[in-house]
Image: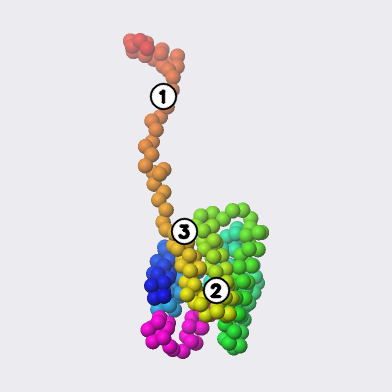
Amino acid sequence: MILLWLAQFALECSGCYLASRRKLWVLAAYLGWGAFSAALTFYPAYVLHQGNPWPWFICRGISRLLLTAVCCEVLAKMQRADLRRDYVLGLLALQAGLILWGFEAHHWLVADVLSNVSLLVGLVLGWVTAKGVLEWPWSLMAAGLATLVAGNALYAFIWSGSNSAWSFYPLPVLLAMCAWNYALLPRNHHSDSVRMPLPPKIKPMTRYDEDFLKGLGISA
């Protein structure tokens, strides 16, 4: 389990760096916060095998809001326009309400399922009503986001009835992180720059050129 945590931590750090290089600040903030919160909760969870669960819940809640912002950015790319402010605020308010309800009622798994399902529904509706095909790297980033929220929803649903789901938790996260890191890798665009310029096309000799050469005593 620790090896999977280290893999997730490494992918979040590298993804944060690559996203910041591409100036994708929302995704960089989400991945950076994920790495920070993972490092913050690692010692009590994996070393001491105890600790107050509230720091983990708080970190998880902030991460959920940042993931919602990433989802809104992907939806904006699907619609090829900025999303309406009331739509974004409504989606963030819904996620915040589910987080607070999960904290207050101690139904975090149910709230997590509802949160991920709502994001997945938003992505599906955005894909159905998309105005054109997503360009690279947003196409792979959208696929990674859908894998993440769908996998998390399924994991939380199974975990609500069986503790064995804990061992499967990192799988959708790792798949999404791998997809995002690959999509954010810099691409080589040197294929056009290495082409040698073609020589100018030689025009056929005209009659005026022939007369000019004859005046110089040169036969064409």
Residue 153 — which label? none
| SS for callout 3 | helix
Quarter of the image for residue 64 reads: bottom right
Across and down, in percent, residue 138 comes to 52, 59
Please report the bounds of the magenta region as a residue range: 41-65
Q: Nearer the viewer, residue 46 or 182?
A: 46
Q: Is residue 138 visible?
A: no
Task: Estimate how packed mark 1 is, as few (under 14), some (14 to 19) or many (20 or more) residues with alpha carbons within 10 Å.
Answer: few
- Report which residue position mark 3 lands on: 183
- The residue at 44%/79% (across/down) is 37
Q: Up-down: is 27 above or below 104?
A: above
- The nearer-to-camera label among 3 and 1 is 3
Q: Is residue 52 visible?
A: yes
- Report which residue position mark 2 lands on: 155
Task: Estimate how packed mark 2 is, as few (under 14), some (14 to 19) or many (20 or more) residues with alpha carbons within 10 Å.
Answer: many
| Left or right of residue 129, residue 14 in this image | left
Q: Up-down: is 146 above or below 160?
A: above
- The nearer-to-camera label among 2 and 1 is 2
Question: Of the residues under marks 3 and 2, which one precedes in the sequence?
Answer: 2
| SS for callout 1 | loop
- Report which residue position mark 1 lands on: 202
